[in-house]
Image (tube, rainbow, N blue to C red):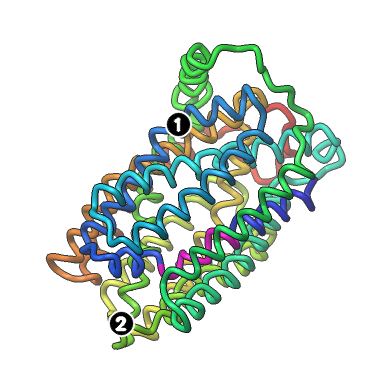
Amino acid sequence: MQRLYLLLVLLHTLAASLIWGINTLFLLDAGLSNVEAFGANAFFTAGLVLFEVPTGVVADTRGRHTSYLLGTLTLALSTLVYLLMWWLTAPFWAWALASAFLGLGFTFFSGAVQAWLVDALTFTGFFRQGGALESVLAKGEIVEGAAMLCGSVAGGVIAQATNLGVPYVIRAFVLGIALVVVVVAMRDIGFSPSRGKRPLAEVKRVLRGSWEHGLANPPVRWVMLAAPFTDGVTFYAFYAMQPYLLELYGDESAYAVAGIAAAIVAGAQIVGGLLVPHVRRLFRRRTSVLLVGTALGTAMLALIGLLPRFWIAIALLVAWGLTFAALQPVRQAYLNGLISSDQRATVLSFDSLLGSSGAVVIQPLLGRAADVWSYPASYGFGATIQLLALPFLWLARRERAPADPITAPEREAG
């Protein structure tokens, strides 16, 4: 199960990361302004918001396998639509619709993959044998970082050697390979889909469940409410780094440099995944990791804005990527330890929904700040916004939830 999980992470991230280093440049090359480019990204995150719960229902009623299959197919089609619109120099409204459709594809993955993994590990006795969920998720972080490193560098180099459209063609091809793997190898294990239930009734049930097991559960609620501020700023910080580094470098056609920006985050993600076991030994509680890591990440974003020098920005980007990568497995383990199996995909999707909601608002605002003032100013504003997550994480710490102690054994059913 772990090997299949890591293979799926590898293929999905490799396909996605081929354009991560050049996506903003791709949109700007298609004739969009900064505010329009980040507006298109906002419609992407709006798609995440709109479709998180319905696709969570698909995962909980039709199965995690079906959800992953639909997500892979949707991403492949939306990638080809993006390519067509770039070629036609489509207007902003077309990019907005296509970006929302792209968001639909990603929502099929957000809760389903992790829910599939936890259910499968539970069924096979992984936790009964003393296995730690962070260890598996950390491996996923390492594989994801390696795939992102290869994909982002390759995407930038290929774009510079050919044009900005070719990485999108290769992305669609890799997604086709992933589609074959899902059809052949992925099965729902430790989970039985409820195929006889009506979708609309299930949406209502899921929303009630998301409330009862998510926002109505204080330890989960506070961590989830921090997500709009951290995720919204993270989306912008990552994608704005592409044109910002080119501006600092002094050559706006050096697409390989933009790919290096994503590759740096990927390399930091690999190291961050390797650091997770050491982080577990340094802290007694998971909420302590979240508080310290979020504060450090905020400081790095502020310094990126205050020190607009190419190599300084590179170094700070590495530090920011390290903190982000070390935080994610700890946060996921915390939430999974407080959610029951039959609600896991739904509540995790709802968590993604809240994070994406922040990105819908924050990305255009910071993009506008970059247009009116500068990229450094937008990073300073982003750091200020991310500070708002710290009070919610502190409230989560005060709850002293059963999943908070790092030394506590992994629970099988939340």
The answer to whether residue 266 is left or right of residue 303 is: right
Looking at the image, residue 125 lies above or below residue 279: above
**Mark 2 to mark 1 CA distance (whole Å):** 43 Å
Asked whether residue 272 is drawn in magenta, I would say: no
Instruction: State which region is magenta.
Output: 14-22
Where does the image place residue 167, in percent across and percent down from the top left? 50, 68
Secondary structure found at label 1: helix
**Earlier-in-chain disc, 2 versus 1:** 1
Q: Quadrant of residue 411?
A: top right
Quarter of the image with the N terminus is top right
The local crowd at label 1, few if under 14, some if 14 to 19, many if 20 or more residues have their Cα within 10 Å, is: many
Q: Which mark is residue 221?
A: 1
Residue sitting farthest toward the left: 372
For label 2, the residue is: 252
* Kind of residue indicated by mark 1: Arg
Where does the image place residue 303, in percent across and percent down from the top left? 32, 72
